[in-house]
Amino acid sequence: MAKTVEIWQDNALTVARYEMSEAEKNILYMVVANVKKEDAPTKMYQVSVKEMAEITGSKELMFETYKQATRKLLTRVFETTLPNGDLLQATFISSALYKKGTGIIEIELSQRVRPFYVDLNQRFTKIQLAAAISLNSAYAKRVYELLCMYKNMKDKTFRRNLTDLKTILGIIDPKTGKDSYSSWTWFQRNILDVATREINGHTDITFTYKPILGDRPGRGRKPVEQVEFEVFYSIKSQSEPVTPLLERLIKQFRLRPDQAAKVLEMHSIEVINRQLYDIHTKASDGKVKNLGSYTAKVFGLETTKEKGK
């Protein structure tokens, strides 16, 4: 079995505020996957364009796309608040060199960002390289990183202020304050729902989210002030393989373990996630009284009561 490659980064970087494209993130992921604590601070890290194409499933060696991506990476500034309260503004890389005729890009990390990958204590995030690169949306990649920060915690449910979440994702311009997705409906549809479809069933975790409304007095629709996330993650063991999706079916959708296993046996991951999304939406709207029974019915399973008839 191939070894799972993981990226480790300080939580301060996970919640940092910056904007980045899918190609830029993938290049940075490939660089960070090779960073070691004992490396010289000025070490140049090699990224193979061919290897990138193989991992992403691309049939083309997108040299021009990557040239544009590294050019942008050199100007990308991230902002994060350090434990002592200081605000750090820095770039991710300091140079990119394309080796003629080799398909190799040599990239040097900036001196300010490097400690966030090597000087790790207790507050850090572990990210699976293949899972992160497989996500098509740059926003889905950032959401995945944020979720990974909680996957090994005992309490995997957390809330984020909506404005804070948008700022982390680079949706709110720090200079002008302009919000690219000021409507909750558009933010939900284009950011969170896309992340749900890409992350659930295709990475080592699954998750659900729900909006938390404000308590503004008076009539009318109350604004969404926070988003609550719940992360499902299980480490597979050789004796008892438990997947995040199986855990989700049992804990969130109230199926018995044998029912959950049957669902995984009968249906594809894509079908399961699509059905669970519909069930979750109906349950949130108060249209489902008995969640376990309804979920079993949707997936064509007999409940205990029905078997006795």
Image (tube, helix red, strand yellow):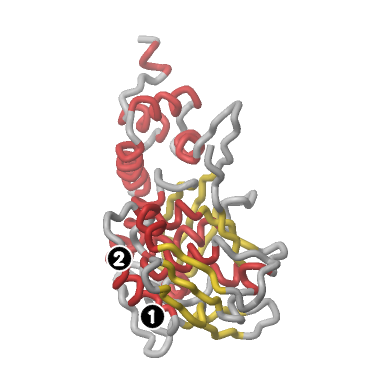
Q: Which residue is mark 2?
A: 62
176 in relation to 195, above or below? below
Identify the image quadrant of residue 117: bottom right
- Mark 1 element type: helix
- Mark 1 belongs to which amino acid? Lys
Question: What residue appears at the point 38 percent right and 65 percent down from the top-left corner?
Answer: 139
Question: What residue appears at the point 54 percent right and 47 percent down from the top-left corner?
Answer: 4
* Res 137 visible: yes
- Answer with left or right where residue 93 lies relative to residue 309: right
- Mark 2 belongs to which amino acid? Met
Of badges 2 and 1, nearer the viewer stands 2
Q: Which residue is mark 1?
A: 72
**Going by the picture, which residue comes out furthest to the top?**
309
Point out the tag, 2 or 1, that comes first from the N-terminus.
Answer: 2
**Going by the picture, which residue comes out furthest to the front?**
101
Residue 142: % across, % down: 45, 64
* Res 225 visible: no
Identify the image quadrant of residue 88: bottom right
